[in-house]
């Protein structure tokens, strides 16, 4: 692995900005009506600190998984695997929230599936950045 801190930073930037793009282009237009008052407007930044903290933890998990995988495996394979594992956890978390809350199940789970694309993108970025550090 080239550099853990740089990989972590790049994965954070990829997941955060990819998620922001998905929110602007898909999540907000499609899910604002079903979620109603449960969804913040784009202008409401009151949850930004908590959200950034979540992306810091998510990107750390992706980077940590990536760093623990066999360095003999191509970096893109490791990146895709790390991103997919965290993406699975994102979907699982949305499903768990449906189980204990009154959030509407169908839009919540679909939102989770769409949101899971961001950690996958982060894993791909980890693989791309570290590509020249291995035989891949």
Image: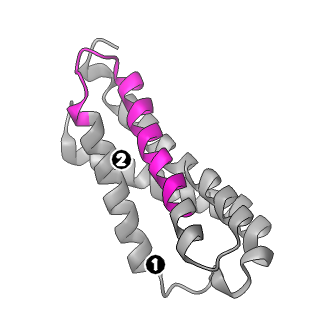
Judging by the rendered image, the residue that carries numbered circle 2 is 10
- Residue 7 is at least partly visible in this image: no
The C terminus is located in which quarter?
Answer: top left
Q: What label does residue 48 carry, if any?
A: 1
Residue 30 higher or lower than 74, as above or below: below
**Position of 10 compared to 26: left or right?**
left
Q: Report the residue at 49% width, 88% height from top.
A: 46
Closer mark to the observer between disc 1 and disc 2: 1
Q: Secondary structure at mark 2?
A: helix
Percent of width and height locating residue 126: 36, 36
Marks 1/2: CA distance? 19 Å
The N terminus is located in which quarter?
Answer: top left
Between 74 and 9, the one lying in front of the other is 74
Residue 46 higher or lower than 26, as above or below: below
Q: Main secondary structure of the magenta part?
A: helix
Q: Does 68 appear in magenta? A: yes
| Magenta-highlighted residues | 67-94
Percent of width and height locating residue 70: 23, 22
């Amino acid at each position: 692995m080239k550099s853990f801190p740089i990989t972590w930073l790049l994965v954070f930037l990829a997941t955060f900005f990819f998620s922001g793009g998905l929110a602007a282009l898909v999540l907000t237009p499609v899910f604002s009506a079903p979620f109603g008052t449960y969804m913040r407007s784009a202008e409401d930044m009151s949850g930004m600190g908590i959200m950034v903290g979540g992306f810091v933890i998510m990107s750390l998990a992706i980077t940590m998984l990536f760093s623990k995988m066999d360095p003999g495996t191509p970096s893109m394979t490791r990146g895709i695997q790390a991103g997919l594992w965290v993406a699975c956890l994102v979907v699982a978390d949305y499903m768990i929230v449906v189980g204990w809350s009154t959030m509407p199940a169908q839009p919540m789970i679909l939102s989770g599936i769409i949101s899971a694309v961001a950690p996958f993108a982060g894993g791909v970025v980890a693989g791309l950045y570290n590509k020249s550090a291995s035989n891949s």
